[in-house]
Image: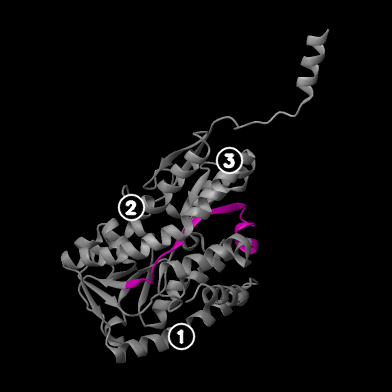
Amino acid sequence: MRKSMALAAALALPVTIVSAQAVELKVADSFPAGHYLVRLMLKPWMDDVTKRTNGAVTFSYYPNQQMGKATDLLRLTQSGVVDIGYIAPSYASDKMPLSEVAQLPESFTTSCQGTLAYWKSAREGVLAKQEYAPNKIKLLMAVVLPPYQVFTVKQKVDSMEAIQGLKLRSTGGAQDLTLRALGSVPVRMAAPDAYESLARGTMDGVLFPADSIASYGLDKLVKHATDGVSFGSFIVAYSISERAWNKLPADAKKAMEEASEAIESKVCADVDKEQQQTRKQLTDAGVSFEPIPDAAKAQMKDKLMGVAKEWAAGIDSRGKPGTEALLEFQKLLADTGK
């Protein structure tokens, strides 16, 4: 009788589940094997989550557009084909136009300045409410790349005249406005397609960060690079679908949130540091980084000064809060010590 009473009392006590059943999440992006952002951000984050959950959460990773084109990864993530996707706002500009606020020219000088401002807005500010929530995705990690430069195959860009008329790869949106302001011709395409266009001569160059030049093999083609002007940037972001997130147990969510907070300041600092090393490697490979003369730099900066307001006005005209997003981002940049 006493044994039965003891068993009944034990069964009435609350049960603490140390860990939920094993979860494997599909992660997909468009980066080639060995891409520096996979090495610096995605893989450390996945390893950290697995460690924090004692192996309960693991990942199957599909790089190099194995699950679909970069431009399709928002849709593939929303539909559940993948759980976590590399969703670059530029590749989904019709659904995420406000995010391009972090890609405007002459906004910041380091990756960390842009990254920390974007992270704050996309997690709890205008971008969180206006873009991530409506698209039913949750941002897990992001890095805003150091200011883009113009890399060209033949033409050295050292004046306004030299950049005018050049056909340059753009991610669209804010970068299109930037290039048009300078008199260039933007050619919109995803990064994996740039090599073929440069090799065929259908483009004169690209707007790219230094680290991506080697990652996509463009160091074999380009010979000249600008220095001294910020031609905008690009957001590399991984998000999980709301559906996949809601299925996760609480301890898995907590581990992922902690891993996300931990990676943000580290990855942008690593990207800033790596850029300096990459510039030396590219220089050794024959790519010439040539400072733009002061007079030409002043002309370019003057042309670029109005791009942010033009961008915001264009977004406002579509019924979205472009000016609000711009003002918030500028304030967040000031808070980071821009």
Residue 35: mark: 2
User: Which residue is under mark 3?
Assistant: 252
Query: Which comes sooner in the sequence, label 2 or label 3?
Result: 2
| Image quarter (top left, top right, bottom left or bottom right) of the N terminus | top right
Q: Is residue 77 magenta?
A: no
Assess disc 3: are there few (<14), some (14-19) or many (≥20) residues with their C-alpha within 10 Å of its C-alpha: many
Q: Nearer the viewer, mark 3 or mark 1?
A: 3
Can residue 254 be seen at all in this image of the molecule? Answer: yes
Can residue 240 be seen at all in this image of the molecule? Answer: no
Residue 305: mark: 1
Helix, strand or loop under label 2? loop
| Separation (CA) of disc 2 from disc 3 | 27 Å
Quarter-of-image position of residue 216: bottom left
| Separation (CA) of disc 3 from disc 1 | 45 Å
Residue 241 placed where, x, y %? 58, 47
Q: Amino acid at mark 2?
A: His
Q: Residue furthest front?
A: 2
Q: Nearer the viewer, mark 2 or mark 3?
A: 3
The region drawn magenta spans 129-149
At 49% from the left edge and 49% from the top edge, which residue is drawn? 85
Q: Residue furthest bottom?
A: 295
